[in-house]
C-alpha cells in the first residue's frame, strides 16, 4: 500500500486456493524429451502463472496439472498482444513445431 498512498484501500473480492505441482516428474521428463528431440536447445522449467486455470478444480481431485503448450515463436514476436485477446493468433511454423512436439510427447507417455 506504500506505492498507492495513505488513502488507498484494498478489498478482496475473490480468493481461491493456489496450486503447486511437483517438479520434476516422469511427465515433465517426457515434456523435456519431446522438446529436446525437436529442439535440442530447449528446456522445461517450472514457472508461476499469475492467472486462473482449471488446475485448482482438478487438484481437489488429486490430479496434478501442468501447462505445456510447445510453440517455438520467432524472435521479436509480440507474444502478449497475440494471445488471449482480439485477433488471437500464432505463426503457422510455431503451430507445426508444437504439433510435432506433442506427437512425440504422447509417444513418451
Image (tube, rainbow, N blue to C red):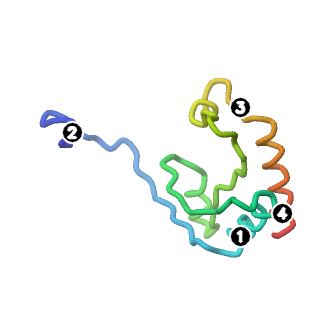
Badge number at residue 27: 1
From the top left corner, tell me how far across and down residue 13 is, in percent. 36, 41
Is 26 located above or below residue 10 in the figure? below
Mark 2 and mark 1 lie on one chain; the one further toward the N terminus is 2
Q: How far apart are marks 4 and 2 (CA)?
A: 47 Å
* Residue underneath mark 3: 89
Is mark 3 in CB contact (under 8 Å) with mark 1? no
Instruction: Residue at 68%, 55% (x, y): give it.
Output: 68
For marks 1 and 4, give the CA distance.
10 Å
Q: Residues within 10 Å of mark 4 (few under 14, many from 20)?
A: few
Element class at badge 3: loop
Label 2 Cα crowd, 10 Å radius (few <14 / some 14-19 / many 20+): few
Per the image, label 1 sits on a secondary structure element best described as: helix
Q: Quadrant of the N terminus?
A: top left
Residue 31 is situated, as x and y percent measured from the top left of the image, at 72, 64
SS under mark 4:
helix
Residue at 65%, 62% (x, y): give it: 43
Residue appearing at x 58%, y 30% in the figure? 81
**Disc number at residue 106?**
4
| 10 Å crowding of disc 3: few (<14), some (14-19), many (20+) | few
Q: Please name the residue that numbered disc 2 is placed on.
A: 3
Amino acid at each position: 500500500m506504500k506505492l498507492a498512498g495513505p488513502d488507498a484501500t484494498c478489498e478482496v473480492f475473490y480468493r481461491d486456493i493456489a496450486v503447486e505441482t511437483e517438479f520434476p516428474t516422469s511427465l515433465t521428463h517426457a515434456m523435456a524429451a519431446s522438446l529436446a528431440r525437436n529442439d535440442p536447445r530447449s528446456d522445461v522449467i517450472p514457472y508461476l502463472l499469475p492467472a486462473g486455470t482449471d488446475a485448482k478444480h482438478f487438484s481437489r481431485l488429486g490430479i496434478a496439472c501442468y501447462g505445456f503448450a510447445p510453440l517455438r515463436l520467432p524472435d521479436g514476436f509480440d507474444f502478449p498482444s497475440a494471445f488471449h485477446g482480439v485477433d488471437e493468433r500464432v505463426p503457422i511454423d510455431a503451430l507445426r513445431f508444437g504439433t510435432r512436439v506433442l506427437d512425440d510427447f504422447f509417444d513418451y507417455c
